[in-house]
């Protein structure tokens, strides 16, 4: 530690977001950056705890105290080397990770002001690219080959690690470009897609082969052509809402909006008749998670008239939740940059039915209040409607209620699943960790 008292004298300083009136008119990244001096000063706040709970909380096992110290001393190259030992894609997690490490930081417990690990991580990654520290490594080949099905964060992590171990890696992607959820689920205002392209170029230079527009329907066939196969297809099936009126026009799954908008920004031509647009509309987002938040931000940028977000669960506590004590992730109210741009948020509402006009377009949604009662047998509380119904105006309804855990057939023993395809929907950082772990398991299997 270069400055053992910095945590006492230096307050937490975040880069913050671009002004709302500026950012809602484009899809540029909303988050700003600090200058190098301020960034180093923020890194100095890390206390290098005897028991670093940030390391414990991170699915990747990032050693935050080590690279924070290197950053504080201005050794950006060493900071990147230390960071990339555990995290192959810090430019992704530095932008979109919820920063489990920060909520487990001792400073978060004692002062409510954790070290800015996520922003520090992003700054280190960007500096590394600018200074040429990110270089393709050409590993010695071991004569074996592995197929990776899916190029989301889990698939990319598995491909990266397997290639590093000397395997000939081929990635099969059903879409026109790599990235999976990173490219087609996360809006550009959170993750510019050039960031993905930049990393894919490095992976290709390192020898990984990408085959686009190739959907793999039978992994068993690949298993006979490759020494091992990784299934990293994510959670493609979104949770739908089978309420009366679901067939009305103007009701869409969230990813129909998000993936289409990202394709439009990539220059892909979408017919007007197929466009999902919030322009001039009253938008209702059903689902209170991050995907719902992304729909809100996208709706604003498309020029919506209003946005309402409803959630069937209770409103989380503000600031502190005794049911999720430190160093666990706190289940508390989260206000995103998209929420700040304007949104009516409501909780404890169930969707009864969708109401349309004579042309078959959705115009209103009937909702009803709910109560959650203790389950006498334990487990999940029991939902009960309270009879308080109301009508919400909605010309566009976006269903953002999560994803169903995939079911897999029985595969040959050389086929491995990872990421959301194995666990169900989770965080990008957990998907990356799963991809790395799966690569290690495959290496053990092929060398047992």
Image (tube, rainbow, N blue to C red):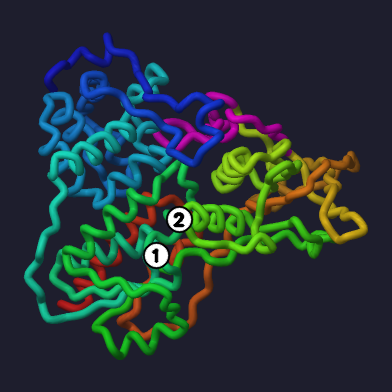
Task: State the separation of the CA atoms marked 1 and 2.
Answer: 10 Å
Tag 2, which secondary structure? loop
Mark number displayed over residue 9: none
Q: Residue furthest right?
A: 358
Task: Of the two numbered discs 1 and 2 on the same chain, state the one appearing first in sequence.
Answer: 1
Which residue appears at 73% of the width and 37% of the height? 305
Which residue appears at 54% of the width and 62% of the height? 269
Residue 212 occupies which quadrant of the picture?
Answer: bottom left
Q: Is residue 41 left or right of residue 339?
A: left
Residue 246 occupies which quadrant of the picture?
Answer: bottom right
Whole-percent x, y for residue 306 in the image? 72, 36
Query: Which quarter shows the C terminus?
Result: bottom left
Which residue appears at 53% of the width and 57% of the height? 259
Verify CB contact (< 8 Å) between mark 1 and mark 2.
yes
Q: Nearer the viewer, residue 47 or 300?
A: 300
Numbered disc in front, either 1 or 2: 2
Q: Vertical placement of 21 versus 155: above or below?
A: above
Does the magenta segment cover residue 349?
no
Q: Nearer the viewer, residue 269 or 37?
A: 269
Does the magenta segment cover residue 346?
yes
Callout 1 crowding tier (Cα within 10 Å): few <14, some 14–19, many ≥20: some
Can residue 48 be seen here? yes
Q: Vertical placement of 216 versus 159: above or below?
A: below
Tag 1, which secondary structure? loop
Which residues fall within the magenta stretch? 318-347
Query: Which quarter shows the N terminus?
Result: top left
Whole-percent x, y for residue 94 in the image? 33, 40
- Most common secondary structure along the magenta stretch: loop
Whole-percent x, y for residue 278 in the image? 68, 46
Name the residue beneath numbered marker 1. 177
Q: Vertical placement of 69 versus 79: above or below?
A: above
């Amino acid at each position: 530690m270069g400055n053992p008292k910095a945590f006492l004298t230096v307050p937490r300083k975040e880069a913050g977001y671009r002004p709302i009136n500026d950012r809602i008119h484009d899809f540029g990244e909303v988050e700003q950056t600090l200058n190098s001096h301020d960034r180093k000063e923020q890194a100095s706040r890390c206390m290098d705890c005897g028991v670093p709970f940030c390391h414990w909380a991170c699915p990747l096992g990032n050693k935050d105290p080590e690279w924070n110290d290197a950053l504080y001393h201005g050794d950006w190259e060493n900071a990147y080397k230390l960071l990339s030992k555990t995290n192959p894609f810090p430019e992704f997690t530095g932008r979109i990770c919820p920063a489990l490490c920060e909520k487990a930081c001792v400073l978060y417990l004692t002062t409510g002001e954790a070290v800015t690990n996520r922003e520090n991580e992003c700054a280190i990654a960007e500096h590394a690219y600018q200074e040429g520290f990110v270089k393709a490594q050409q590993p010695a080949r071991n004569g074996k080959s592995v197929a990776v099905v899916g190029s989301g964060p889990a698939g990319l992590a598995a491909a990266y690690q397997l290639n590093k171990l000397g395997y000939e890696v081929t990635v099969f992607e059903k879409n026109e470009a790599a990235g999976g959820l990173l490219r087609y689920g996360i809006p550009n205002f959170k993750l510019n897609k050039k960031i993905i392209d930049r990393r894919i170029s490095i992976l290709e230079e390192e020898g990984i082969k990408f085959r686009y527009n190739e959907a793999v329907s039978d992994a068993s066939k690949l298993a006979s052509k490759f020494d091992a196969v990784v299934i990293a297809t994510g959670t493609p099936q979104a949770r739908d809402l089978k309420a009366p009126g679901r067939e009305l026009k103007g009701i869409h799954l969230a990813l129909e909006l998000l993936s289409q908008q990202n394709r439009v920004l990539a220059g892909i031509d979408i017919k007007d008749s197929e466009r999902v647009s919030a322009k001039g509309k009253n938008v209702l987002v059903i689902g209170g998670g991050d995907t719902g938040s992304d729909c809100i931000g996208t709706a604003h940028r498309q020029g919506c008239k209003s946005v309402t977000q409803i959630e069937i669960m209770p409103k989380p506590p503000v600031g502190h939740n005794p049911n999720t004590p430190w160093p666990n992730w706190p289940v508390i109210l989260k206000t995103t940059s998209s929420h700040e741009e304007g949104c009516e948020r409501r909780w404890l509402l169930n969707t009864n039915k969708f109401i349309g006009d004579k042309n078959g377009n959705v115009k209103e949604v009937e909702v009803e209040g709910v109560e959650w009662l203790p389950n006498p047998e334990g487990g999940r509380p029991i939902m009960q409607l309270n009879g308080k119904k109301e009508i919400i105006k909605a010309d566009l309804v976006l269903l953002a209620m999560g994803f169903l855990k995939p079911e897999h057939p029985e595969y040959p023993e050389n086929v491995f699943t990872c990421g959301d395809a194995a666990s169900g929907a989770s965080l990008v950082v957990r998907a990356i960790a799963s991809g790395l772990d799966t690569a290690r398991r495959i290496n053990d299997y092929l060398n047992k």
